[in-house]
Amino acid sequence: MTKSVFIDGAVGTTGLEIGERLAGRSEFSLITLPEDRRKDDAARAEALNAADFVILCLPDDAAKAAVAMIDNTSTRVIDASSAHRVAQGWTYGFPEVIGRDKVSQAQRVSNPGCYPTGFIALLAPLIRQGLLPSDWPYVCHAVSGYSGGGKALIGRFEEDTDVAFRDYGLALGHKHVPEMTEFAGLAHAPVFAPAVIPAHRGMVVEVPLHLGMMPRSAPTDGLRDCLADFYASSPIVTVHADTPDELLLRRSMAPSDKLDLYVFGARDGSQARLVAVLDNLGKGASGAAVQNLNLMAGLPETAGLVL
Ligand SMILES: NC(=O)C1=CN([C@@H]2O[C@H](COP(=O)(O)OP(=O)(O)OC[C@H]3O[C@@H](n4cnc5c(N)ncnc54)[C@H](OP(=O)(O)O)[C@@H]3O)[C@@H](O)[C@H]2O)C=CC1
Ligand SMILES: CC(=O)N[C@@H](CCC(=O)OP(=O)(O)O)C(=O)O
């Protein structure tokens, strides 16, 4: 039976890409609001309560307000914002790490942040298997395309084309740190150093490791093998056996819902670099939302994804 879906924030950066992935899918019918009513609370409340599935593509405050408008017990929610990532009663929508069954059965699913998707994908399996310590002071460097900041950051980068690199999050305490800590299974919050480059989409998330200084760790081949085993059944996550000399993000990157993981290591085993490459708007946002929607609707998880 066709399920109805309401994307609240449908004309924003994430909402538009979810709409593209759902276009032409006969399993779903979209509830849409006209431009002059898309921020009208009465119209939104009606759509939020009429839909089988709601996907929130809104700023955090608006996402919280939208959830409060749902007054029935049947509407199921996927929230792309960071409002509910570590909240009670919400399932973290990272099926490969949390479990497909948990996502399939959940009433309230919070999509992971784009950076945490790379960070957690790299660390959670290794820490669970005891190949890396949970109580290590981890660091995460990352660069993102400017669409990661939604319409506001897209506007800024398109207006000021002279910006070559934007370091930010310099006050520390980025909003992604709580979910990175919790779902990677860390005892301490990582130092998170994000940056933006003048490309529309795409991101590289990196965890450098002083393996030789850790109380316990595995050789880099062991880390790679563990990740390869963990994601062996995933049609979305690829653990690369090769170690290329460079990883490039291109301004012309096409939408992708894939997540590519690499493990690089020093010959003497003293240091390693774990690297995730993804599309912030793909597995980092819209692709993940559609994957979660598929699972919640009992459909193949990759239906409609760009792989
Ligand atoms: N961009 C990305 O790569 C990622 C984004 N996210 C998260 O997804 C959410 C959406 O982000 P993104 O699409 O980038 O943001 P955008 O700013 O591009 O889009 C947000 C949309 O929400 C609309 N909106 C704001 N307030 C309301 C309201 N009260 N009622 C109805 N609509 C409203 C905006 O309207 P208007 O058009 O008028 O401004 C806009 O269309 C955010 O929480 C973001 O943090 C998560 C992962 C990655
Ligand atoms: C480049 C850029 O600005 N990125 C955003 C994160 C994008 C994302 O993952 O969205 P959530 O806010 O829903 O977590 C930031 O750092 O705030």
Image (cartoon, rainbow, N blue to C red):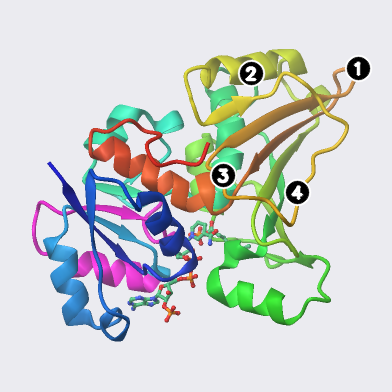
Quarter of the render that holds ligand 2: bottom right
Q: Nearer the viewer, residue 179 or 290?
A: 290
Q: Nearer the viewer, residue 207 or 240?
A: 240
Q: Is tag 2's residue or tag 4's residue first in the polypeptide sequence?
A: 2
Amino acid type shown at disc 3: Ser
Q: Is tag 3's residue or tag 1's residue first in the polypeptide sequence?
A: 3
What percent of the width, then of the height, locates residue 274? 72, 32
- Seen at 36% across and 69% down, the residue is 9
Which residue is under mark 4? 249
What percent of the width, then of the height, locates residue 106? 24, 40
Q: Is residue 287 left or right of residue 276?
A: left
Residues at discs 2 and 4 in contact (Cβ within 8 Å): no
Up/down of 222 relative to 158, above or below: above
What percent of the width, then of the height, locates residue 202? 66, 51
C-alpha distance separating marks 3 and 1: 35 Å
Which residue is under mark 3? 256
- Seen at 12% across and 62% down, the residue is 50
Is the CB of mark 2 within 8 Å of ligand 2? no
Residue 268: numbered disc: 1
What percent of the width, then of the height, locates residue 182? 48, 42
Residues at discs 4 and 3 in contact (Cβ within 8 Å): no
Q: Secondary structure at mark 4?
A: loop
Q: What stretch of residues is rendered in magenta?
A: 61-86
* Location of residue 302 by image quarter: top left
Up/down of 232 relative to 186, above or below: above
Q: Is residue 171 left or right of residue 167?
A: left
Q: Residues within 10 Å of mark 3 (few under 14, many from 20)?
A: many
